[in-house]
Image: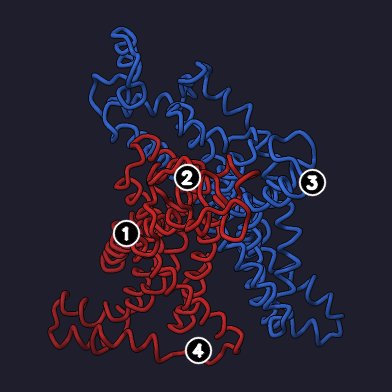
Chain colours: A blue, B red
Amino acid sequence: MTPYLLRHVLKAVVTLWAIVTVTFVATRLSGNPIDTFLGEGLTAEGRQALIDYFQLDRSLWHQYLAYLRGVLSGEFGLSFVDRRPVTTVVAERLWPSGQLLLSSVALTVAVSLPLGVLAAVYRRSWIGSAVMVVAFTGYAVPSFVLAIVMVLTFSYWLNWLPVVGNGTWLHFIMPTIAMSGVLIAALTRFTRNAMLDVLGQDFIRTARAKGLRETQVVLKHGLGNASITVISVLGLQIAGLAAAGSVVVESIFSWPGVGQMLVNAAILRDYPVLQFGVIAVAVAVVAINILTDIAYALADPRIRLARA
Amino acid sequence: MASLVDALPRLRRRSGRRKGQGADIIQTIALVCAVLLAGGALLAPWLTPFDPLDQSLLARLRPPIGFDRYAAGHLAGTDELGRDVLSRSLHGLRLTLALAFAGAVIGLLIGGLLGLIAGQRRGWVEDGIMSLVDMQIAIPFTLVALLVLALMGSSLTVLVLVLGIAGWEQYARIVRGEVRRIAAQPYLEAAHTAGAGPFYIAWRHVLPNLVSPLVVQFTLSLSNIVILESTLSFLGLGVQPPQPSLGSMVGLGRDYMPTAPWIVLTPAALIVVLTFTVQILGDWLRDRADVRLRER
């Protein structure tokens, strides 16, 4: 199992390096970062201080190495807007985003697993088709449209739910659903496909032949084995989709999380915050991917017991 | 494998009799929607008498036809500056579709080329390209798009490039897989033996095999690009005002939702109809072409 993990950790490190490099290249491609970010209202000294800080008078290669060194030592600079360390700005927004992510994943799992199993077991009847229509809808409706329609219906017309903030549990309902739409679509589809694969295996026939009840066959032998695939999808797909979704959903519902911060930073051109935010989210996504790989390895004896 | 032209009838020939009648009705509706949407987008300047940028302070926030205070001619109402919502929506649809097509073509070119290289050259070139593909899958692309658009400004050129880079890895995987599969076929060996050159083989044997999976992937990626574009525009980072795009209309109309929901609902409905239509057609093409696109 060790070589398996080593390979995945190595891949993750390379991916992170690529992201850090992309953020560097993106800032330097757009010309002199100072002119891009702080066009007006910069004194000659302030300008010189920034040039010294980013070492813009040195070669690109030198700048890149200095940048990498800063990243490795955890120095990401100050926010242009409120002059606080970007690490603090991002850190205080992690928990609200985490809460929303957890509630969305919980809802997604609670809805998708039963739907996916149903769709697989009843794939030839209308139940299976109905489930797949639901999954299809989740893919086709962008999360911001889903969110806007919910806000119109439940906040402005019916006056049931609050729109802004994350104060009470009522505040969680619409953002969680808006985040989960595409996640449910993805996970339902994969649960169904994984279940179809497993239910066609020989050991399922054996389980039926030895007289197990159908629920036990489907849930214990079927879902038990399909869950390996489902876990891997949960980690690989959902982390990326949720990162993208949180950007949209948090800015619609004024949710004080990382996603809203990223959009604000992008609009205000608060480049240090944006840069660190993208790196932080990427680290989170890659970390979730690694944890997924480990969970996958632990769940699958073929990998767990493999000697390289 | 005869020629490039044979691949398209192949898409048609394998018409799926496996699906029931319900599916056929849905696909017919999707086809009709596709024609209507494409027609509306292409003919937008001639379909509505109003310029999408023309403001009219006397006819602000007027509701659609059938409601009180309806302003004659403005079928879907007007927005906060008295601009015609229907005309803006159709022009937005036009821009969204144009951007999506351009982005999908760029993705096809980048991904197709890299996939071709990866499939033909083994070794470190292939490893390098495939690890790029893995990275593209691992990185949440919406965030990279935010970063790039914030840094480089949201001109249409930058936006198109971002949309193009968004989906290249799918094409690369498909092309590489197909190229490797075809490379193992006996007819390719026969062509080699007969003295065919690499360009002849690529044109005559590889390309015809690629047409149907690429057509399918192109269609499926269109809807992803439409969603990405409208999301970015919704956040204020895509198409910039006053130019209308479906996403930015929803984003800017948000402030008027309690009193004038039609500003938001018309473009939002168009987005949903558009993504549904494209996805249904994509799935349908996939079933017909019987291509096993690898899902992840």
Secondary structure of residue under mark 3:
loop
Location of residue A93 in the rendering, given as x and y in whole percent from the top left corner: 63, 30
Residue kind at label 4, given as amino acid type:
Gly
Residue A48, quarter of picture: top left
Q: Do labels 1 and 2 share a chain?
A: yes
Chain under disc 1: B
Which is more toward the observer, A137 or A222?
A137
Are dots 3 and 2 on a single chain?
A: no
How far apart marks 1 and 4 lie (CA) works out to 30 Å
Along the line of sight, the residue nearer the viewer: A124 or A53: A124
In the image, residue A41 sits, relative to residue A59, either above or below, namely above
Foreground tag (3 vs 2): 2
Residue located beneath label 4 in the image: B16
The disc placed on residue B82 is: 2
On the same chain: label 2 and label 4? yes
Q: Quadrant of the N terminus of chain B?
A: bottom left
* Residue B76 located left or right of residue B126: right
Q: Are marks 3 and 4 on the same chain?
A: no
Q: How far apart are the alpha carbons under marks 1 and 2?
A: 31 Å
